[in-house]
Image (cartoon, rainbow, N blue to C red):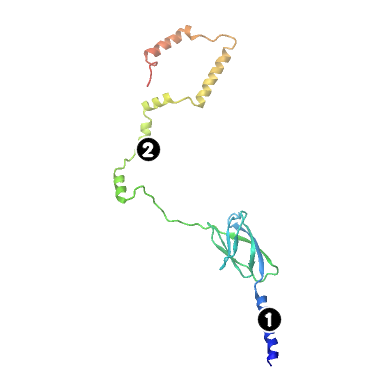
Amino acid sequence: MTRHLLPLIFLLCSFKAFSQDQEEPRLIQFSGVIVEGDSLKPVPFVNIIIKNSSRGTISDFFGYFSFVAKENDVIEFSSIGYKTATFKIPDSLTISRYSLIQVLRKDTIMLRETVVYPWPTKEQFKEAFLNLQIPDDDLERARKNLEREDMRLRSEKLPMDGSMNQKYFSQQYNSRLYYAGQLPPNNLLNPIAWSKFVQAWKKGEFKRKD
């Protein structure tokens, strides 16, 4: 009796092990591209993890990925600035490959307001605030900048701009064309020029200015 039971037990164990092997999920070459939901631009360097495991990969610069997974595996896609997305590999595949275009939506993270003060204590802040020198308003600053004496001093120290240089060059060029082939007039013998010089000298226009 025992001699007949041993083969039967061996067959049952073999059938059970064979059934367990048949029920094992198939391996799938899981590939795809990850893009943004708004612009459909590729999302680089996305973390791709099989949920509840330590297996996964990272998408490349163009958002492409490819790795081996199993049927019914839940794949999790996560990246900074995007909402986490999941996808479950179906168990009704007829081939051992599966491709996916995964869309990630942007995620806006609102941070709490942070106020940085240059004073370590409230007492020091209060003292600095009470001793604060409030500057003039815009109208008062404009009035000070438009003082005639200040404008005169500034105008004397300002160099010629581009338009003034162009005008001076044009005058010199026209003067050379006008007196081409002849000597230009000599103001040393011009009585009108001497009269203007004397008047300017009497007004003090040739005095040294600090």
Three-letter amino acid code of the residue under disc 2 = Asp
**x and y percentages locating residue 107 in the rendered image:** 52, 58
Asked if labels 1 and 2 touch by Cβ distance under 8 angstroms, the answer is no
Task: Quote the CA–CA distance across marks 2 and 1.
Answer: 94 Å
Q: Which residue in the protein does label 1 denote?
A: 14
**x and y percentages locating residue 201 in the rendered image:** 39, 13
**x and y percentages locating residue 123 in the rendered image:** 29, 50
Q: Is residue 209 above or below residue 57?
A: above
Is residue 171 shown left or right of residue 94?
Answer: left
- Point out the image quarter for the N terminus: bottom right
Q: Nearer the viewer, residue 195 or 94?
A: 94
Q: Which mark is residue 31?
A: none
- Residue at horizontal 67 percent and vertical 76 percent from the top: 21
Is residue 107 shown left or right of residue 1?
Answer: left
Q: Count every numbered label the image shows and give the total.
A: 2
**At numbered mark 2, what does the secondary structure look like: helix, strand or loop?**
helix
Quadrant of the image occupied by residue 48: bottom right
Q: Which residue in the protein does label 2 denote?
A: 138
Residue situated furthest front in the rendering: 3
Query: What is the crowding at mark 1: few (fewer than 14 residues within 10 Å), some, or many (at least 20)?
Result: few
Q: Nearer the viewer, residue 64 or 169?
A: 64
- Point out the image quarter for the C terminus: top left
